[in-house]
Image (cartoon, rainbow, N blue to C red):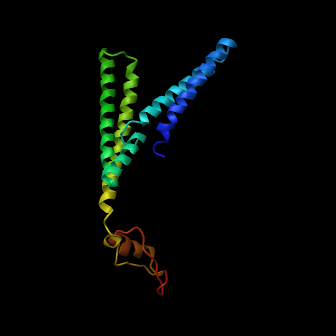
Amino acid sequence: LILCTPITTPYLLLLTVLCFIVGLLVIVLIGFGAVALFIWTLLGMVNTQLGLFNLLPGFPLDGGRALRAGLWAWSKDYYRATSQAALVGLLFGVSFGLFGAFLLVGALSGTVSGALASSGGWIVLLGAFLFAAARGSRKQAAIRGSLASVPVRELMVSNVVSLSPDTTLEEAVNQYFLPYGYGGFPVVQDGRL
């Protein structure tokens, strides 16, 4: 499943090229269809760019998931592999952000074409998205890794406080919810829930 996009993207590119050639033949032979050809070509180029972007080894992109799978197979530690792949994702996010900022500054100063300013903005946004997603994945891997070896008995509440059905709402809030800080309590009567 991880390699689905990397495998299908070249086939979609080939299909796009074939449709482009057929479209050119239709335009030359019949004389119409230029708009459909333009749209199909544009969709093919965008799909190819997205597929290539997904191949970057920055987690959580498809290439990063493949990197994590390889690191996991090598180290036998899923959470460490996720953390390392997410670190690569962080580096790609920062790199994209800096490159996009460079394009923006270059466009504003006149050293780079002004047409690249909007591209720089999009690249900064892509970098921010990748950075945020990788950072979240890295944090989640750290939390899950630290909780993986903790037994439930160490985290569970062993002294369960219950309410009787006759408890008023005011008593429940003032004597149970506020002092204990729990979001709910079981209601028990005669040993039955």
Q: Residue furthest front?
A: 74
Q: Quadrant of residue 65?
A: top left
Q: Is residue 26 above or below residue 94?
A: above
Q: Position of residue 125 (x, y in %)?
A: 38, 33
Q: Is residue 175 above or below residue 119?
A: below
Q: Residue placed at 35% from the left, 42% from the top? A: 132
Of the pair 8 and 149, the residue shown nearer to us: 8
Q: Is residue 105 above or below residue 132?
A: above
Q: Residue placed at 65% from the left, 12% from the top? A: 28
Q: Position of residue 138 (x, y in %)?
A: 32, 49
Q: Position of residue 70 (x, y in %)?
A: 36, 46
Q: Residue furthest bottom?
A: 190
Total marks placed: 0
Q: Is residue 193 above or below residue 108?
A: below
The answer to whether 4 appears left or right of 143 in the picture is right
Is residue 70 visible to us here? yes
Is residue 136 visible to us here? no
Of the pair 31 and 181, the residue shown nearer to us: 31
